[in-house]
Every structure is written in structure tokens, then in C-alpha cells.
Image (cartoon, rainbow, N blue to C red):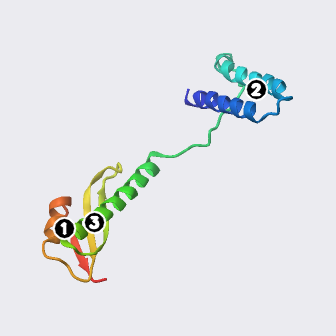
Amino acid sequence: MKEYIILVALSAIIAAVTDILAPKEWRGYVRIAVGFLILAVLISPLAKVKNIEIFNVDTGFSVSDVAIKDKVTEELIKNVEKDIEERALSEFKTDVKATAELEVDGEHKIKGVKKIVIKSGKVPDGLEARLKEVYGCENIEFRNK
């Protein structure tokens, strides 16, 4: 059903684009050809009932859930690192570079922040306690830049 909906949408887009781009003297012919295309798309489910294949639709989209969840995890790591850096600057007036590791289970569900590494010339008092409070992370390392 998903492929059928995609095919109907694509044929509608193709019909609109060809109608816009076709020269005026060709529009009648283009509309007839596109009309046959849309008609074939619309009756393709009926053809499948009779085991006749009009279109073999392969959209080429095969993005797995794992790839999507990995991308979400990467974005969340970037957001956590940016938040740590902004928090250190706003609350402690210290410019730091942060890296974070997230704890992810076998189903790619994020459990929490596993490790934070702070690169800074000077570590302000209270930063470690604040990060533990905000992120619930006990593994915080400080390194010189």
C-alpha cells in the first residue's frame, strides 16, 4: 500500500511538472500521455487482483531503524556537548570543550550520559558537581587543553 501511495503521489507531481513545462502547442499531447499514466497507476491495484503486474515499484528507500536511531544518538550527543559548553560559560564563566558518551542499550534506546570529558585550562569549582546534578553522570574527566 505504501508503494501505491508513493506511486500515485509521484505521478501527480510528474503530471503537474509536465503540464507546467510543456510548450503550449504540445500540452494536449502531454496531457493525454500523462492521463494514460495516471489511469494506469490508479487501476494497478485491480490488476494485482488478477495477478497482472503493470508497475513494479521499487522506491529505493531502505533506511533502517538502526541507522535512524544512530543518527538521533549522534545529534543528541552534539546537543549534550553544546549544552555542557554553554552551561560552563554562562554559569562558571569558563570556556571549555566537552565530549560526551551516551549509554545506549541493545535496542538503541538511550539510557543516559555514560561519560563526560571536559578539556579546559582551568577547572572551575563546582562544575563537576553541577554536571553530575544535571546529567546524572558519575564518570567526569577533566583534561588540560
Identify the residue position indicated by label 3 in the image. Answer: 86
Please provide percent x and percent y for residue 43.
68, 18
Dot 1 or dot 2: first in sequence order is: 2
Q: Is residue 66 left or right of residue 98?
A: right
Q: Mark 3: which amino acid?
A: Glu
Please provide percent x and percent y for residue 55.
70, 29
Numbered disc 3: secondary structure: helix
Seen at 39% across and 58% down, the residue is 74
Dot 3 or dot 1: first in sequence order is: 3
Q: Which quadrant of the structure image shows residue 132?
A: bottom left
Seen at 40% across and 50% down, the residue is 69
Circles 2 and 3: CB atoms closer than 8 Å? no
Callout 1 crowding tier (Cα within 10 Å): few <14, some 14–19, many ≥20: few
Q: Mark 2: which amino acid?
A: Val
Residue situated in front as seen by the camera: 134 or 57: 134
Q: Is residue 38 left or right of residue 95?
A: right
Mark 1 and mark 2: Cα distance apart in space: 63 Å
Please provide percent x and percent y for residue 73.
37, 55
Which label is found at residue 34? 2
* Above or below, 72 relative to 12: below
Q: Is residue 137 left or right of residue 23?
A: left
Closer to viewer: mark 1 or mark 2? 1
Identify the residue position indicated by label 1 in the image. Answer: 91
Q: Mark 1: which amino acid?
A: Glu
Callout 2 crowding tier (Cα within 10 Å): few <14, some 14–19, many ≥20: some
Which label is found at residue 145? none
Seen at 30% across and 66% down, the residue is 100
Mark 3 and mark 1: Cα distance apart in space: 8 Å
Count of numbered tags: 3
